[in-house]
Amino acid sequence: MAITASMVKELREKTGAGMMDCKKALTEVDGDMEKAVDFLREKGIAKAEKKADRVAAEGLSAVVVDGNKAVIVEVNSETDFVAKNENFQTLVKELAEHVLAHSPANVEEALKQNFKGGSETMQSHINSAIATIGEKLSLRRFTVVEKGDGDAFGSYLHMGGRIGVLTVIAGSTDEQLAKDIAMHVAAINPTYVSRDEVTADVVERERDVLKQQALNEGKPENIVEKMVEGRLSKFFEQVCLFDQPFVKDGDQKVGNYVKSKNATVQTFVRYEVGEGIEKREDNFAEEVMSQVKK
């Protein structure tokens, strides 16, 4: 069967695959459009497997809100260039919407679920995107949070999603307050909401370190304890949201600012794309030679 330009165009529109790939697929299946779609999907899965050993440490975070539920996700790509791709941005939003709607327990469960109620799994949907975009892509993590009717969600995406924050403000429906707190969390990166969340063993370990530092500085034993308590306050300021000077008003602490609004921070989630992923340093010359030898 002769493969026409209009057939190639139709298959390309259906799958998003490249023109030559579409022509080859149609040729392989003698012009059967549905079989050609399957052929490309299978090819996409093969491409995804070839890319499995690559490091995907770029990408985007995204926040989606629906009523009293919200989700923050991180989806990784190999390059920052792809993170700016419209198809990739659409994929991130689709994955976030699916997670919010179906509440999987973890990433592994999410990847096995039928994507948006269809016949393909989320992993298959990601594999199709890999075939189109040409890089390893992966859903790395997500967190689903809920609020009450009298509470507020706040979200902030820095640099389009390089850093994403989702906050829950309790006791107030002030969404601007929730967003302001999200911006602060993005900028300052606290670990805890308040001192109450810092476990006793963490405090004691920090106290021991500070005490030894003071002794090593030659400070007299009788003033070391007071020095340690003072430095411990600095530690809490580094790690506790409520102890930090508010980025929009450095004259007051975040805890006092939120309290003045008759609210409190229930929780926050902060994702920085690629944090904790060891980025592989490739030798470009070796990579080129490996391609030449194939």
Image (tube, rainbow, N blue to C red):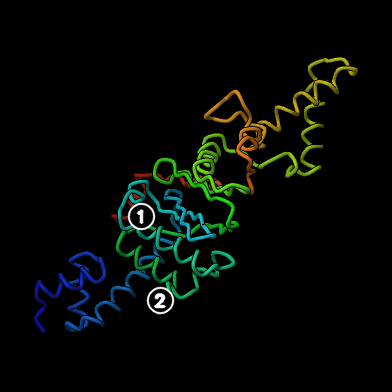
> Relative to 234, does residue 57 appear above or below in the rendering?
below
The residue singled out by tag 2 in the image is 120
Pointer 2 and pointer 1: residues touching (CB < 8 Å)? Answer: no
Examine the image and state in which quarter residue 11 appears.
bottom left
User: Callout 2: few (<14), some (14-19), or many (20+) C-alpha neighbours within 10 Å?
Assistant: few
Q: Residue at x 19, y 78 (%)?
A: 26
The amino acid type of the residue labelled 1 equals Gln
Q: CA distance from mark 2 to mark 1?
A: 20 Å
Q: Which mark is residue 141?
A: none
Relative side of 260 to 41, left or right? right
Q: Earlier in the sequence, mark 2 or mark 1?
A: 1
> Relative to 263, does residue 18 appear above or below in the rendering?
below
The amino acid type of the residue labelled 2 equals Glu
Q: For the residue labelled by badge 1, is the local secondary structure a helix, a strand or a loop?
A: helix
Q: Residue at x 55, y 68 (%)?
A: 104
Q: Which mark is residue 89?
A: 1
Q: Nearer the viewer, residue 217 or 246?
A: 246
Examine the image and state in which quarter residue 69 appears.
bottom right
Relative side of 285 to 246, left or right? left
Q: Position of residue 199 (x, y in %)?
A: 77, 44
The quarter of the rendered structure image containing the N terminus is bottom left
